Image: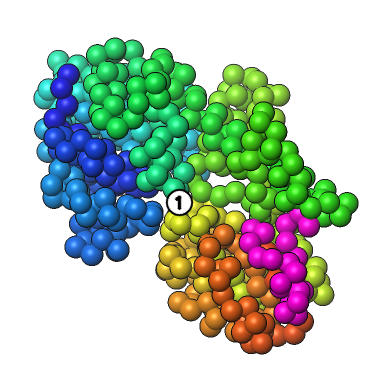
Amino acid sequence: MKITKICCIGAGYVGGPTMSVIAKKNPNIKITVVDVNQERIDAWNNPDVTKLPIYEPGLAEIVKETRDENLFFSTEIDKTIDESEMIFISVNTPTKTYGKGKGMAADLKYVELCARSIAKVATTNKIVVEKSTLPVRTAQAIKSILDNIGGDVKFSILSNPEFLAEGTAIQDLLNPDRVLIGGESEEAIESLANIYASWVPQEKILRTNVWSSELSKLTANAFLAQRISSINAISELCEKTEANVNEVAKAIGMDSRIGPKFLQASVGFGGSCFQKDILNLVYIARSYNLHEVADYWEQVILFNDHQKRRFADHIVNTLYNTVSGKKIGFLGWAFKKDTNDTRESAAIYVADYLLNEQASISVYDPKVPAKKMQSDLNYLNTRSVSENEQQVTAFSNPYEALKDTHAVAILTEWDEFKTYDWNKIYVNMKKPAFIFDGRNLLDKTEMTSIGFEYSSIGQ
């Protein structure tokens, strides 16, 4: 099938950047990203591309180049579905907060709603592409809905999981390690492969069955998260034995069988995918009575929670066993640098722990607004909205955020933090002035020479 029009349902962290790059590389295909959220669509259509709803280096430039040429953002979902030959499903698949599988299984209600909408309005044959991260065999459920509701319309289902990393999403899309397409229809697979082939070498476009494709996404994220928990486990041992986790990571990373990526010890991983996908993997394993498999992967999550709790405990213990009434300055709220995504960010949970100990927190993050920080804390439902507002204050200037603080906690590895005037920060802090470097970002020798009491992960 020759593709001339694409619809992407979901204008989030996957749909927006992915469709922008596809539009840039396929100027003859009209691509429309649709979403029920009018505010989000308005943000994508903002004439000022610095105000897009998602921050990714390089994204604004591509949107500016392609928007209103062959890339469009709209709330006209039904009309766009009917006009398109290929439909990407890029909606959120959060962990269930209710019923069977609560706390582990993926909540597929948004995916099912998409399938029902497609079946209801489609009048011509469609290729439906799973872009959201989904449990194994979800494609079968989508096809069942489409075939039973869609009448005479024929639907081909493909799995095309996204392997981009937030913060480097555009570069990952422009230069992917691989593109994975799973499906049963060879014609449908080649229709999608031809779109990617406009910039991705054929040897990097992998064709599999749909089940392998779905499971590969969960497995990739589980392996990456496992590496982070593994080095973080070693970081705790390093702190007890006077080893340096950075030196250990470098030594093992030079082994070609291991490699250096994802061996940076930290306060813990965050983001929308790692925890959600591992929990999903655990749930699937348990549903097949594979309890040893489930226990193995669940430990990755348990250790990540431990690392965040351990970091917060260390702050309390170092500050003479109490942070009550003390002001702690946070540098960073996003789960990693170069993104404004805060989902499952370590900062949220460290803040929650310290707030329970009656600390006052001042925060600076270059891309996360105060409203989002409050929303993240309120979602935990640990305390009232007014209490969160009273105890947590966001600043637009880092020096103001750190003024009169007892300690600084670095929660995100933004490069700009390394360039600050730390002598100025030291002068304006309470003494002794503590730095808790959760990202091993600063130089210990330099910080201690200024006068800071400095501690970091794994040293």
**Does the magenta run of residues contain 445?**
yes
Residue 140 seen in this snapshot: no
Where residue 235 appears, as percent x and y from the top left, is 76, 49
Residue farthest right in this picture: 241
Question: What colouring style does the render use?
Answer: rainbow
Residue 156, by quadrant, is: top left
In front of the other: 223 or 248: 248
Secondary structure category for the residue under label 1: loop
Where residue 402 appears, as percent x and y from the top left, is 59, 79
Residue 158 seen in this snapshot: yes
Q: Amino acid at mark 1?
A: Gly
Query: Is the residue 281 above or below the residue 95 in the image?
Result: above
Query: Is the residue 306 above or below the residue 106 in the image?
Result: below
**Does the magenta run of residues contain 455?**
yes
- Horizontal side of 187 relative to 29 (left or right) equals right
- Horizontal side of 394 relative to 349 (left or right) equals left
Disc 1 crowd rating (10 Å Cα; few below 14, some 14-19, many 20+) is some
Where residue 33 appears, as percent x and y from the top left, is 23, 43
- Horizontal side of 206 relative to 395 (left or right) equals left
Residue 399, by quadrant, is: bottom right
The residue where tag 1 is placed is: 167
Q: Residue at x 63, y 78 (%)?
A: 422
Q: Residue at x 33, y 13 (%)?
A: 184
Where residue 409 appears, as percent x and y from the top left, is 65, 68
Which segment is the magenta one? 439-459
Assign the N terminus to one quadrant of the image.
Answer: top left
